[in-house]
Amino acid sequence: TAFSVTSELQQHRDLVCVHASHIIPDSVTSYYFEVRVVASGMGFGRGCGISVGLWPDSLRDDVRGRHAFPGYAPKSYGWLNEGQMLPAHERHNFRRPEKAVFAENDVVGVGWDKRKGLLIFTLNGKKLKDVRKKVRAGRYYPAVGIGSRGTRIEVNFGQTPFKYDWNAHHADANGPLAP
């Protein structure tokens, strides 16, 4: 699924969140998706760019404004292209942010192990060492926040093979995996 931002962003620091049309199913024990940054757009960098993560069902229709990035909005979780992993209520930066930044042509993955409450990020098919622990139970959408006009992304929910083999690394005997 491809998406591009053209005229949606009117002002500097305007943000838009794009989430999947379907919520992550309650019946699965883990979920994974990937986002390829096709074009980074104008003004890509500090304070604007891309955030990938989980968007709470309670904010399903609240997808515009200064807090419309996964990680900035309440009860959301996200990884910003600058290297920060943010829940809205606390800021946890990766210990080595130079290893956790992503840009044009990178493939970023987000995995959620619901049983363990872990959020796992991948970059170009490799799992990052840092994970977000204690993700609150709830109903979430896979989401991408964009703050740069001209940004183009492709989202893979499993319609093509993932760069990171989520199912091989996170096989779960206690329940189904998705997608």
Image: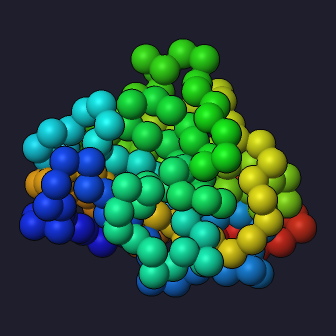
Answer left or right for 115 relative to 15: right
Residue 151, position as x, y percentages in the image: 18, 53
The reply to whether residue 27 is visible in this rendering is yes
Q: Quadrant of residue 171?
A: bottom right
Q: Is residue 108 above or below residue 26?
A: above
Question: In which quadrant will I find the C terminus?
Answer: bottom right
Q: Give the color scheme: rainbow, by chain, secondary structure or one colour.
A: rainbow
| Figure label count | 0
Q: Is residue 114 above or below residue 131?
A: below
Residue at 32%, 37% in the rendered image: 47
Of 34 and 169, the residue lying toward us: 34
The reply, left or right, for residue 44 in relation to residue 53 is left
Q: Please, is residue 91 above or below residue 17 in the view?
A: above
Where does residue 150 sit, x and y in percent of width and height? 11, 54
Query: Residue drawn at (81%, 48%), measured in percent from left and top?
Result: 134
In this rendering, would 12 be left or right of 132? Answer: left
Residue at left offset 85%, top offset 60%: 115
Residue drawn at (40%, 71%) of the image: 63
What is the quadrant of the N terminus in the image? bottom left
Q: In this view of the protein, can residue 34 be seen by the observer?
A: no
74 or 136, nearer to the observer: 74
In the rendering, at what x and y percent does residue 37 appear?
27, 48
Taking the image as shown, residue 47 lies to the left or right of residue 165, namely left
> Which residue is situated farthest in the right direction here?
174
